[in-house]
Amino acid sequence: MLAFIIRRLAQAVVVVLAMVSIVFFGAYVVGDPVWMMAPGDATQEQIEEIRRTFGFDQPAHVQFLRFLADIARGEFGRSYVHGSSAIGLILERMPATLELAFAALVFAILFGIPLGLYAGLKPDHWFSRAVMAGSILGFSLPTFWVGLMLIMLFSVMLGWLPATGRGPTVNVLGVETSLLSLEGWRHLMLPAINLGLLKLSLVIRLTRSGAREASLQDYVKFARAKGLSQGRIIGVHILKNILIPIVTVLGLEFGSLVAFSVVTETIFAWPGMGKLLLESIQRLDRPLIVAYVMVVVLLFVTINLIVDILYSALDPRVRITGAES
């Protein structure tokens, strides 16, 4: 087990270094941030001074090696625009993004599993067919369009929910959260629904497929022959067996919710990491871009590592296969 964990950690380090390299040099070739930082009436001497101050006059590989040395010391540089620590700005916005991603995942689970179970156990019912048609729409409709329609319906036409902002927050152990107030939940509902629709469709399809497969297994037929109630058969013999792959996929999908919340946060003016990333790209704020990618990559790698370790603990064949490869 220890050798397996060490091997996975080594792979994680390689992935992180590869992503940092791609993002750093990608941001380097896109444009020159000096022109975003200098005032419009700056002279050539002032521009050159800014270039020397931030080290932009050095070759790309020298800037990259210096950046790696800063990371090794736990530093990600200072934002060109905000003038403060890049990783500090990311961590400051992280609670809002995690809160939104968590709410979207809960929304997908609460509605996706019951709807998927019904569609899997009664595939010929009209409601099941409507659910599956709706799941196709969830995969197909663009997030920005759905977000605008939600704002139009629930904020503009009905006036039930606020269209933008996070709402009031409460400080809990040094972390700001809006989950402890009714107004905070009102602000959270629309962006969480918009972000969670794609995952809702995924959960519905995963649950439906698992339920249809499990309902044909011998242990389910034997449970019916014993005269067990339908509720017990579904809750104990079907749901418990299909939850393992669903939970595994959702664990990995949580990382994608965090990483791809940019559109949702922009539409609903949600003050999270995604909105900050978009502003950083527009201003070529390289330290902030790289710090964001580092956080997201580390999140993905950590989740994958946890899943691999749990699987290797439950199934030794995973460790053997990994060692052979």
Image (spheres, grey):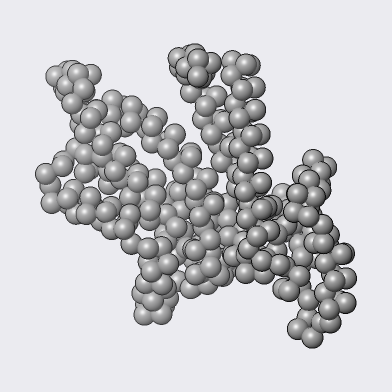
290 or 314, nearer to the observer = 290
Q: Is residue 322 above or below residue 106?
A: above
Query: Would you say 187 lies left or right of 160 here?
Result: right
Task: Give the quarter of the image for residue 228.
Answer: top left
* The N terminus, quarter of image: top right
- Residue 30 in the image, given as x and y percentages of width and height: 63, 63
Up/down of 220 relative to 212, above or below: above
Tell me if 99 is positioned left or right of 106 in this view: right
Query: Which residue is depicted at the point 30% across and 45% down?
Result: 204
Q: Residue at x 26, y 39 (%)?
A: 208
Q: Residue furthest bottom?
A: 41
| Residue drawn at point x = 11 percent, y = 44 percent | 124
Q: With 56 as the anchor, is 90 left or right in this view? A: left
Residue 182 visible in the picture:
no
Name the residue furthest front. 59
The answer to whether one can see residue 253 in this image is yes
Percent of width and height locating residue 162: 49, 73
Front residue of 29 and 213:
29
